[in-house]
Image: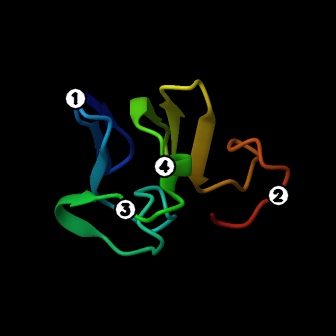
Amino acid sequence: MAVACGDGFTTIVTEEGEAWACGNGENGQLGLGDNEHQLLPTHVTGSEVFGGEALVMMSAGLKHTAGVTKDGVLWSWGQRGFGQLGHGVRELR
């Protein structure tokens, strides 16, 4: 299990590669598809999440999160007003 903490939020990767998140979600940094706060760890789900691959790690920034799958693919989400997600755009994702 791995835990990473950002500005008012926490992300968790389980031994099975599942992602969980809780806390401040105002910028989409929890990866739950909304901007809601979560008081309890909530499973990051969906068929398209991480291309269906297990995560090996997550890292939390101030208001954004990045995760790497077992195949080495980098995913990032949350606040990207300064290009910190590397997507080439500035909207929330």
Nearer to me, 18 or 79: 18
The residue shown at (46%, 75%) is 34
Amino acid identity at mark 1: Glu
Q: Quadrant of the C terminus?
A: bottom right
Identify which residue, 64 or 45, lies in the foreground: 45
Q: Position of residue 21 (x, y in %)?
A: 29, 52
Mark 1 or mark 4, which is nearer the start of the sequence? 1
Q: What residue is at 39 percent from the left and 64 percent from the top?
A: 25
Q: Give how far apart the Cα atoms at labels 4 and 1 are.
A: 16 Å
Residue 36: percent from left, percent from top: 36, 75
Residue 15's label in the rendered image is 1
Residue 37: where, in percent of width, then height? Answer: 30, 70
The reply to whether callout 3 and callout 2 are in contact (CB within 8 Å) is no
Residue 89, numbered label: 2
**Alpha carbon of mark 2 to alpha carbon of mark 4: how far?**
24 Å
Q: In this view, does 82 lie above or below 92?
A: above
**Around disc 2, counting alpha carbons within 10 Å, would you say few (fewer than 14), some (14 to 19), or many (20 or more)?**
few
Left or right of 41? Residue 20 is: right
Check residue 52 in the rendering and tell me which mark sits there, or answer none: 4
| Mark before the other along the chain sequence, 1 or 2 | 1
The span from disc 3 to disc 2 (Cα, nearest Å) is 24 Å
Q: Nearer the observer, disc 4 or disc 1?
A: 4
Which of pointers 1 and 3 lies earlier in the amino acid sequence? Answer: 1
Which of discs 2 and 4 lies nearer the camera? The answer is: 4
Are the two marked residues, 1 and 3, in contact with CB atoms closer than 8 angstroms?
A: no
Q: What residue would you read off at disc 3?
A: 45
Cα separation, mark 3 vs mark 4, equals 10 Å
**Which tag, 3 or 4, sits closer to the chain's start?**
3
* 87, 62: nearer the viewer: 87
